[in-house]
């Protein structure tokens, strides 16, 4: 039975953490070759399962020790049909990976959750295309049909919610939201933005959030910003408008480099963890409801520790 599907505790405004850049940590710190950037493949064998368990446990301990909440995001960002087919997995295997990912998070929740540190389990959904640059655009209906397969698997697990991370255009975000609504699962939409603070599609963050809300009757529980450094989007946020109130979380990059520069980098740019923490804290002046703090490309437990220290 799910603990929080009908009452997400992060909506109360208390501080919640989540993990950092899973894929970049596995590739650059562990030397693991991830096909198509897919971390879910590690769920196939015990050695890989232990690596993922240890990864999530490191972050869970930070939340536990600081008595703050934690959102456990499953390692399934690439665990949808098109990506699985490229790697060579069947639909049945894919469903098993998604189920197994949630079971792993249940074990970590059992180990670390307390009344002072509530743990929410989230089924992570990634884009059908590239998380930096969409190669093609689906209609909202096509996106709903595509993502409903993964979402329906999560529905029958103990996931409390689903999170669509690195959404690059509105129609896909609308489709994910509608699929989650039909499955009666709370859904979070996290948009990728470029160095100008706009989505890769060219749409402003404000217009994207308002468009999804109009099309889904305010369907998402909240929104997040991901895969960008705070210096890329802080200038588009306004403390005098209502739309930023829909944003509760950040998955920022460690580096202030553009997506193109990161794609062409052969070394990891981990930035400055302490500075990133200070930048998260400063953003609270513009994002009044900001209470969920995680990382994206290049971040690891050091960044989350500094972010936690800063926002507390």
Image (cartoon, rainbow, N blue to C red):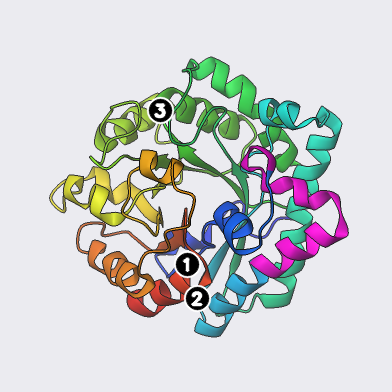
Q: Secondary structure at mark 2?
A: loop
Which residue is under mark 2? 68
Q: Main secondary structure of the magenta part?
A: helix
Q: Earlier in the sequence, mark 2 or mark 1?
A: 1
Q: Nearer the viewer, mark 1 or mark 3?
A: 3
Q: Is residue 242 above or below residue 205?
A: below
Which residue is under mark 3? 169
Q: Nearer the viewer, mark 3 or mark 2?
A: 3
Q: Secondary structure at mark 3?
A: loop
Structural crowding at the residue carrying mark 1, measured as other residues with C-alpha within 10 Å and reported as few (<14), some (14–19) or many (≥20): many
Structural crowding at the residue carrying mark 3, measured as other residues with C-alpha within 10 Å and reported as few (<14), some (14–19) or many (≥20): many
Q: Position of residue 52 (x, y in %)?
A: 71, 61
Give the number of the disc on residue 16.
1
For image coordinates 79% across by 44% down, the residue present is 97
Is-magenta flag for residue 39? Answer: yes
Question: Where, by quadrant of the figure, is residue 114 drawn?
Answer: bottom right
- The reply to whether dot 2 and dot 1 touch (C-beta < 8 Å) is yes
Residues at marks 1 and 3, CA–CA distance in whole angstroms? 26 Å
- Viewed as shown, does residue 280 lie left or right of 176? left
As drawn, the residue found furthest toward the left would be: 240
For image coordinates 49% across by 67% down, the residue present is 17
Q: Secondary structure at mark 1?
A: strand
Foreground: 232 or 182?
A: 232
- Viewed as shown, does residue 307 lie left or right of 30? left
Q: Position of residue 256 (x, y in %)?
A: 31, 54
Magenta residue span: 35-55
């Amino acid at each position: 039975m799910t603990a929080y599907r009908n009452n997400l505790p992060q909506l109360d405004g208390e501080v919640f953490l989540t993990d950092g850049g899973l894929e970049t940590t596995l590739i650059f710190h562990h030397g693991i070759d991830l096909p198509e950037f897919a971390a879910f493949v590690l769920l196939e064998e015990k050695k890989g399962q232990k690596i993922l368990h240890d990864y999530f446990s490191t972050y869970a301990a930070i939340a536990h020790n600081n008595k703050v909440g934690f959102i456990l995001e499953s390692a399934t960002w690439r665990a949808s049909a098109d990506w699985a087919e490229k790697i060579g997995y069947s639909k049945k295997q894919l469903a098993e990976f998604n189920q197994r990912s949630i079971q792993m998070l249940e074990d970590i929740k059992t180990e670390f959750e307390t009344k002072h540190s509530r743990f929410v389990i989230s089924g992570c959904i990634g884009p059908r295309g590239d998380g930096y640059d969409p190669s093609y655009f689906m209609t909202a209906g096509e996106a709903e049909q595509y993502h409903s397969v993964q979402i329906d698997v999560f529905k029958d697990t103990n996931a409390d919610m689903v999170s669509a991370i690195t959404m690059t255009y509105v129609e896909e975000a609308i489709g994910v939201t509608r699929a989650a609504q039909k499955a009666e699962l709370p859904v979070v939409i996290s948009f990728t933005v470029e160095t100008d603070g706009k989505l890769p599609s060219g749409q402003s963050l404000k217009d994207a959030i308002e468009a999804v809300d109009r099309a889904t009757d305010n369907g998402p529980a909240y929104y997040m910003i991901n895969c960008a450094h705070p210096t890329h989007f802080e200038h588009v946020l306004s403390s005098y408008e209502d739309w930023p109130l829909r944003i509760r979380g950040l998955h920022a990059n460690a580096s202030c480099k553009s997506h193109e520069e990161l794609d062409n980098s052969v070394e990891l740019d981990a930035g400055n963890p302490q500075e990133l923490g200070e930048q998260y804290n400063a953003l609270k002046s513009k994002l009044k409801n900001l209470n969920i703090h995680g990382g994206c490309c290049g971040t690891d437990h050091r960044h989350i520790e500094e972010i936690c220290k800063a926002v507390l």
